Amino acid sequence: MALLEIKDIHKSFGNLHVLKGIDLTVNKGDVIAILGPSGSGKTTLLRCINYLETADVGFMTFKNQSYDLSNTSKKEIADLRKHTGFVFQNYNLFANKTALQNVTLGLTVARNVSKEDADLIGMQMLEKVGMQDRANHYPSQLSGGQQQRVAIARALATSPDIIYFDEPTSALDPELIQEVLSVMKTLANEGMTMVVVTHEMAFAKNVSSHVILMEEGKIVEEGNSKDFFENPKQERTKEFLRKEE
Ligand code: ADP
């Protein structure tokens, strides 16, 4: 049984049909890289499956529970987000909270974990991303790469079954990209299930287990990472890979 199964997502913004019937299956431990040109709908897809956007049509089964992606209720959103983590392109940390407070907020506020226990878990998560020394720093005192690592620690704190990453390194200066990718690689090696929208070809090639290429709201090609890069079937995929080289 798949961890996550998505069927037939459609989403339009006004007249713009951004997602045109996307199906996707994610098994436990998969690391799926979603590639594609800018504007192809990658971010919208990720946002729809965590209810950050409401799809026009779409169904999802996650941990044996069914969700209608076009019809959200507060309860469905809360149920789903108990089990998912999301890492944003721009980190989305609270500016007036320290690194540790950013990590523990989801535990103390949403889950009634005591402050002591939350701090303990928070420090463990910061250690996991190499940020324990900066626990009491505010986001403005951290580099972009450090902020993103705190955001990953925050996503990890609630022990999610899956983490969605929306272009996690695209806001970073080139010299800060590797420290974030390296944390993500460690998580992948530990068996964390991850869906990653990215332009980092080396990450897709070397870390992900599966790759999906999207264009104009549809999946052009999907396959295991090795086949996708070494033996692409679609002409469009070959062209995309040539351009990215
Ligand atoms: P990608 O992640 O592949 O670059 P996006 O999912 O961000 O693509 O965007 C797909 C298309 O949808 C783009 O043309 C974008 O401008 C449009 N779009 C995304 N979000 C919105 C929104 N909230 N309102 C209107 N148009 C949007």
Image (tube, rainbow, N blue to C red):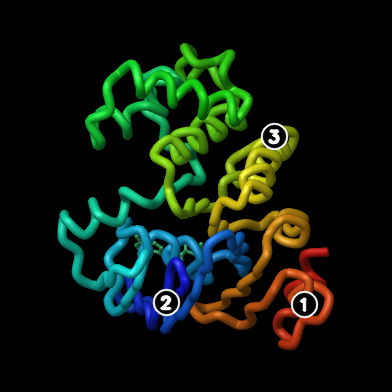
- Secondary structure at numbered mark 2: strand
Q: Secondary structure at mark 3?
A: helix
Q: Within 8 Å: ligand 1 and the Cβ of disc 2? A: yes
Task: Identify the image quadrant of residue 240.
Answer: bottom right
- Quadrant of ligand 1 in image: bottom left
Q: Which residue is mark 1?
A: 227
- In this rendering, the answer to whether 140 lies above or below 168 is above
Q: Is residue 116 above or below residue 80?
A: above
Compare marks 1 and 2 and give the one earlier in the sequence: 2
Between 165 and 90, the one nearer to me in the picture: 165
Q: Amino acid at mark 1?
A: Asp
What amino acid does circle 3 point to? Glu
Nearer to the camera, 232 or 123: 123
185 displayed left or right of 23: right
The residue indicated by pointer 3 is 179
- The earlier-in-sequence mark between 3 and 2 is 2
Callout 1 touching callout 3 (CB < 8 Å)? no
Q: Position of residue 242 (x, y in %)?
A: 82, 72
Badge 1 element: helix
Residue 69 visible in the snapshot: no
Which residue corresponds to mark 2?
19
Q: Tell me which residue sits at (43%, 35%) in the image.
A: 157
- Please give the name of the residue rendered at 72% of the width and 79% of the height, measured from the top-left corner: 237
